C-alpha cells in the first residue's frame, strides 16, 4: 500500500475512532503532501512523500530543541508525539556503524583526501543514505574522515 493510501486510511480511521491527536497529525501530513502536489503540479510517489516527511521531521526535531531551550517542555512533548507519528512513514534509519562504513566506501571510491573534496564524497553518499540517515551525522562522519 502506498504512503498516500495509508494516510487516507489512517485519516478515515482516526475520524471514526475520535482520536483527535492522530487526526491532527495525519491532516497536517495530508495537507503538506497536497500542497506540494498542487504547487509542483505533480502526483507524488512514495519517494517524494518521504522527502516531505523528512523535511517535516527535521522541523519537528528543531522545534523540540528550541522549545526545550526555552523551557517549554509541554510544547516539546507535543512535537515529539508528532515526530513519533511521522516515523512510521519513513524507512528504517541506518545505524552509525552502517553510515560510517558507507562513508569509508565513498571516501575510497572518490579518492578524496582533504576536506576541500568533501563535495565529491557527499555526492556519492547522499543518494545511498537519503531518508535513511540524518544528514548532520553523515556530514560529521565525512568531516572526521577527511580531517575537516
Image (tube, grey):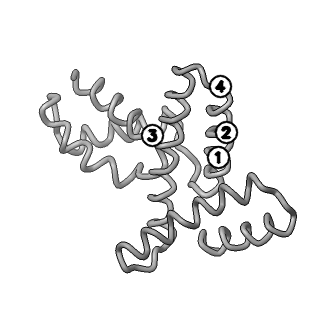
Mark 2 and mark 1 residues within 8 Å of each other at the beta carbon: yes
Q: Is residue 83 left or right of residue 129?
A: right
Label whose residue precedes the other's in the sequence (3 or 2)? 2
Residue drawn 32% across and 34% down? Answer: 139
- Percent from the top left, x then y, of residue 13? 80, 68
The structure residue drawn at horizontal position 41% and vertical position 52%, both measured from the top left corner, is 130
Mark 4 vs 3, N-terminal side: 4
Q: Residue lying furthest right in this view?
A: 17
Q: Which residue is mark 4?
A: 73
Dot 4 falls on a residue whose secondary structure is: helix
Q: Residues within 10 Å of mark 3 (few under 14, many from 20)?
A: some
Q: Position of residue 67 (x, y in %)?
A: 55, 28
Of the 4 image quadrants, the one containing the C terminus is top left
Image quadrant containing the N terminus: bottom right
Looking at the rendered structure, the secondary structure element under dot 2 is helix
The residue pinned by badge 2 equals 78
Can you tell which mark lies on residue 82?
A: 1
Which element type, helix, strand or loop, lies under badge 3? Answer: loop
Looking at the image, is mark 2 or mark 1 nearer the viewer?
2
Q: Which residue in the structure is indicated by mark 3?
A: 134
* Quarter occupied by residue 99: top left
Give me the C-alpha separation between circle 1 and circle 4: 14 Å
Cβ atoms at labels 1 and 4 below 8 Å apart: no
**Earlier-in-chain disc, 1 versus 4:** 4
Q: CA distance from mark 3 to mark 2?
A: 21 Å
The picture places residue 138, in percent across and down from the top left corner, at 37, 36
Give the spatial CA distance, label 4 vs label 3: 24 Å
The mark closer to the camera, 3 or 1, is 1
Vertical order, 135 against 49 (above or below): above
Judge whether 57 appears above or below 115 on screen.
below
Amino acid at each position: 500500500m502506498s504512503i498516500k493510501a495509508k494516510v487516507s486510511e489512517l485519516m478515515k480511521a482516526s475520524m471514526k475512532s475520535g482520536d483527535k491527536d492522530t487526526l491532527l497529525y495525519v491532516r497536517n501530513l495530508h495537507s503538506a503532501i497536497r500542497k506540494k502536489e498542487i504547487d509542483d503540479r505533480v502526483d507524488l510517489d512514495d519517494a517524494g512523500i518521504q522527502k516531505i516527511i523528512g523535511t517535516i521531521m527535521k522541523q519537528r526535531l528543531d522545534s523540540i530543541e528550541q522549545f526545550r531551550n526555552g523551557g517549554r517542555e509541554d510544547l516539546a512533548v507535543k512535537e515529539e508525539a508528532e515526530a513519533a507519528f511521522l516515523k512510521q512513514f519513513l524507512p528504517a534509519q541506518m545505524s552509525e556503524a552502517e553510515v560510517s562504513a558507507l562513508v569509508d566506501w565513498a571516501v575510497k571510491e572518490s579518492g578524496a583526501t582533504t576536506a576541500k573534496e568533501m563535495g565529491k564524497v557527499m555526492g556519492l553518499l547522499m543518494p545511498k543514505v537519503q531518508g535513511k540517515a540524518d544528514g548532520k551525522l553523515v556530514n560529521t562522519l565525512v568531516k572526521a574522515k577527511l580531517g575537516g
